[in-house]
Image (tube, rainbow, N blue to C red):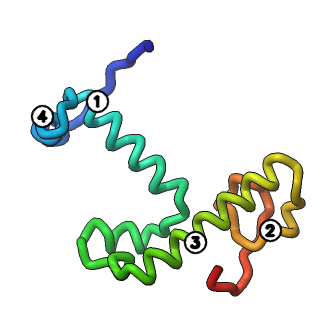
Amino acid sequence: MSSNSIRISAELFEQAQRQGEVLSRSAAQQVEHWARLGAAVEQSGVSVAELVDLLRGDSALRNPTERALWAAKRAQQARDIAAVESGKAAHESMSWFSGGRAGRAKAIDSPL
């Protein structure tokens, strides 16, 4: 695997070192792990407002019922995106907005 050098703040590097030690990762491995998590969060459909709430620690997403609802929504969205990308469904037939990954998929007013 090839690698590239990037610049990060000394503070972030030190945090990665500390957290990496706990999880038996190098600082670089810890930063890569955080980057993968960040990419997954962006692709999950979590809104900026929800992410800010999560970072503040006061999110309604901590409620198990709401977490389950959002998990169901993201699962349906993933199925819809896969169906559009594979050609098994048309954009217009999708029940969830896809965040741009499947083109013109539309949102509807439905809890699931």
Q: Nearer the viewer, mark 2 or mark 3?
A: 3
Q: Nearer the viewer, residue 8 or 18?
A: 18
Question: Is the C-beta separation of discs 4 and 1 under 8 Å?
Answer: no
Residue 26, picture quadrant: top left
| Identity, as a three-letter code, of the amino acid under mark 4 | Glu
Tag on residue 21?
Answer: 4
Residue 74 is left or right of residue 3, and the answer is right
- What residue lies at 40% left-to-right and 49% top-to-bottom? 38
Mark 1 surroundings: few (<14), some (14-19) or many (≥20) residues within 10 A:
some
Say which element carries label 1.
helix
- In the picture of the structure, the residue carrying the numbered disc 3 is 72
Say which element carries label 2.
loop
Q: Position of residue 41 (x, y in %)?
A: 45, 56
Q: CA distance from mark 4 to mark 1?
A: 11 Å
Mark 4 surroundings: few (<14), some (14-19) or many (≥20) residues within 10 A:
few
- In the picture of the structure, the residue carrying the numbered disc 2 is 94
N-terminal of the two: label 4 or label 3? 4
Tag on residue 71?
Answer: none
N-terminal of the two: label 2 or label 3? 3
